Amino acid sequence: MFLTKKNLATARALGVALVATVTFAGCATYKEEFATINSRLDQLDAKVQNAAQSAESANQSAQQANQRLDQIEGRVQKLESAPRRVPRG
């Protein structure tokens, strides 16, 4: 079969259409991949924020515990430096 100008033009058009289809399909795949990556990043961001809140809460609890220890430290030192009592009996 000989290629005429009409057949050659049709072949070119089909080739361009095929390339365009593959290109657009590739773009759709990238869009899906970006959407998946963005979703994962959002999940990680939420986990990081929760971890930061937990760390802040733990830090506040530790500071409160340190304040309580500081408050009783003087009493403990006073008891340790007091003369020993002699047991009865």
Image: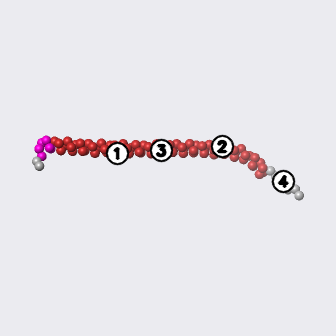
Relative to 87, does residue 53 appear above or below in the rendering?
above
Which image quadrant for residue 89?
bottom right
Which residue is pictured at 60% across the width and 43% down the height? 57
Q: Is mark 1 on a helix, strand or loop?
A: helix
Which of the two labelled residues, at mark 3 and mark 1, occupies the earlier sequence position? 1
User: Which residue carries the number 1 mark?
Assistant: 29
Q: Distance between the residues labelled 4 and 2?
A: 34 Å
Classify mark 3: residues with Cα within 10 Å, few (<14), some (14-19) or many (20+).
few
Residue 5 location in percent, x, y?
A: 12, 42
Q: Are marks 4 and 2 in contact (CB under 8 Å)?
A: no
Hey, what amino acid is under mark 1?
Thr
The magenta span reads 3-8
Residue occupying the point 40% across, 43% down: 35
Residues tagged 1 and 2 counted as in contact (Cβ below 8 A) = no
Closest to the observer, 24 or 55: 24
Q: What residue type is labelled 2?
A: Gln
Badge nearest the viewer, 2 or 3 = 3
Mark 3 lies on residue: 43
How packed mark 4 is, by other alpha carbons closer than 10 Å (few <14, some 14-19, many 20 or more), is: few
Q: In this rendering, which labeled residue sits more in front, label 4 or label 1?
A: 1
Location of mark 2 (residue): 64
Q: Dot 1: few (<14), some (14–19), or many (≥20) neighbours within 10 Å?
A: few
